[in-house]
Image (cartoon, helix red, strand yellow):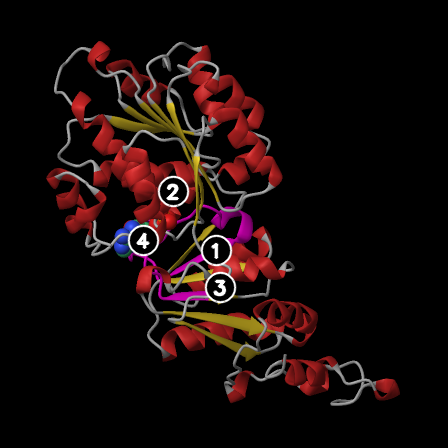
């Protein structure tokens, strides 16, 4: 399937070519013709599947008829509203809208909580056809009458499952009530739970359903490797690997916010340029950290699972698990950030003897073992075991022994 075959106009095809996309992803092939035909769509697609372009490109196509350079705000009512659960995703989607829509005289902006409203209000007053928003902040604007949703033609609920998890559905309901009933609605969700189907029944009219392969399967072009190492030597091993392999653009996951900031400052002190993104940082700090990383100004971005949700950093060559996650599913989410869209990637896990249970859980989920590599000088110290290594008291293998056995077995 080619983009031409999807029925896109020359203008949008030029956009696609400019982005360097040679062929549509499965969710794009399925969704674009339906959306252009005006259908409501319920799509199961995770981040990394090309879902943003799957709704932005056809929506731009539909709105092109309204494109104008008129001065009056009345000529620029909100016609496309995209709701997202997090500010990071909102910013990311808004950037996609701006770059896909370059050259088309449609105005767009993004509004999200945690920042001052004044600059947003100034832009909204002038009129925008495309608005990307988090639900709470959008309702604040509605309350201040800085935005009017009565002319919305297309509503997109992006990552609806997370909006549900985060308790945003009552807000979404209030927002939907302000929109014309004959709008087109597109609901994107990583998973189809019963609750999501229920929501679709509430917000969508006779929708077409699209399901693309879940990213639970690991991309073929992704290399996974684990290094056994004691917890307190992980930072030094990481530095060693970064230098040894001249790594750039390394996304490092830690379990805790404190762990993230500690590691970031340690790396910085040791001359590895680094920033951190976690829940305790202000929106401005997070945006700055992400921009520094995206712009290659820093080599390493340290993140917690929660803070990383919705982050899209394209073509990431390395993901490092500084600690294995408590939830094995998070391992899949984390490493899904590399090896995307055909690019090759490496997922590295630094595993201490304490993490043998987490390692087993991850390997059970993967249904295979993660290949183990060693850097001799960083091998865990068996003498640290409270009991004689490699066999602990009572004949049970020591944790060191268990790690050696688990790394390289199922
Ligand atoms: P998304 O699932 O929307 O977060 O997109 C994931 C990444 O895939 C983004 O970096 C997009 O720029 C990229 N992408 C989207 N569509 C395509 C395509 N057809 N070919 C190659 N890359 C794409």
Q: How far apart are labels 4 and 2 at the CA level?
A: 28 Å
Nearer-N-terminus badge (2/3):
3
Q: Where does label 2 land, which residue?
A: 287
Nearer-N-terminus badge (3/4):
4
207 in relation to 32, above or below: above
> Which residues make up the magenta segment?
291-319
Nearer-N-terminus badge (2/1):
1
Lateral position of residue 132 relative to residue 99, left or right: right
Query: SS for tag 4?
Result: loop
Res 96 seen here: yes
Q: Where does label 1 land, which residue?
A: 214
- Res 229 → quadrant: bottom right
Q: How far apart are labels 3 and 4 at the CA level?
A: 16 Å
Q: Nearer the viewer, mark 4 or mark 2?
A: 4
| Crowdedness near tag 2: few (<14), some (14–19) or many (≥20) residues, C-alpha within 10 Å | some
Q: Nearer the viewer, mark 2 or mark 3?
A: 3
Q: Nearer the viewer, residue 5 or 173?
A: 5
Nearer-N-terminus badge (4/2):
4
Q: In which quadrant will I find the C terminus?
A: bottom right
Residue 344: x and y in percent read 34, 69
Q: How far apart are labels 2 and 1 at the CA level?
A: 29 Å
Q: How far apart are labels 2 and 3 at the CA level?
A: 30 Å
Q: Which residue is drawn at the image coordinates 58% and 84% (left, top)? A: 379
Nearer-N-terminus badge (4/1):
4
């Amino acid at each position: 399937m080619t983009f031409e075959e999807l029925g896109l106009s020359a203008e949008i095809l030029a956009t696609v070519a400019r982005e360097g996309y040679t062929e549509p992803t499965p969710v794009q092939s399925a969704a674009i013709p339906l959306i252009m035909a005006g259908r409501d769509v319920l799509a199961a697609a995770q981040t990394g599947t090309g879902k943003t372009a799957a709704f932005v490109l056809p929506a731009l196509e539909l709105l092109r008829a309204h494109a104008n350079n008129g001065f009056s705000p009345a000529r620029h009512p909100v016609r496309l509203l995209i709701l997202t659960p997090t500010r990071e995703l909102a910013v990311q989607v808004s950037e996609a809208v701006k770059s896909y829509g370059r050259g088309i005289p449609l105005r767009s902006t993004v509004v999200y909580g945690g920042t001052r409203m004044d600059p947003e209000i100034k832009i909204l007053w002038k009129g925008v056809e495309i608005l990307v928003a988090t639900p709470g902040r959008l309702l604040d604007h509605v309350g201040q009458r800085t935005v009017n949703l009565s002319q919305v033609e297309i509503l997109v609920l992006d990552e609806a499952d997370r909006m549900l998890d985060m308790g945003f559905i009552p807000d979404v309901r209030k927002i939907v009530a302000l929109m014309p009933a004959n709008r087109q609605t597109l609901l994107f969700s990583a998973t189809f739970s019963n609750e999501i189907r229920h929501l679709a029944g509430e917000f969508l009219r006779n929708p077409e359903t699209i399901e693309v392969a879940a990213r639970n399967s690991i991309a073929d072009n992704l290399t996974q490797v684990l290094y056994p190492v004691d917890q307190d030597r992980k930072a030094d091993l990481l530095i060693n690997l970064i230098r040894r392999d001249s790594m750039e653009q390394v996304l490092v996951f830690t379990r805790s916010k404190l762990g993230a900031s500690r590691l970031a400052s340690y790396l910085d002190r040791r001359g590895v340029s680094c920033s951190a993104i976690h829940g305790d940082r202000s929106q401005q700090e997070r945006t700055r950290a992400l921009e520094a990383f995206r712009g290659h100004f820093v080599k390493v971005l340290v993140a917690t699972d929660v803070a990383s949700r919705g982050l899209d950093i394209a073509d990431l060559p390395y993901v490092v698990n500084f600690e294995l996650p408590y939830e094995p599913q998070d391992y899949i989410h984390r490493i899904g950030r590399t090896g995307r869209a055909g690019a090759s990637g490496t997922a590295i896990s630094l595993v201490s003897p304490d993490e043998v249970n987490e390692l087993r859980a991850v390997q059970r989920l993967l249904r295979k073992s993660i290949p183990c590599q060693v850097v001799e000088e960083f091998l865990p110290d068996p003498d640290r075991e409270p009991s004689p290594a490699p066999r602990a008291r009572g004949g049970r293998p020591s944790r060191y022994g268990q790690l050696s056995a688990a790394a390289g077995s199922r």
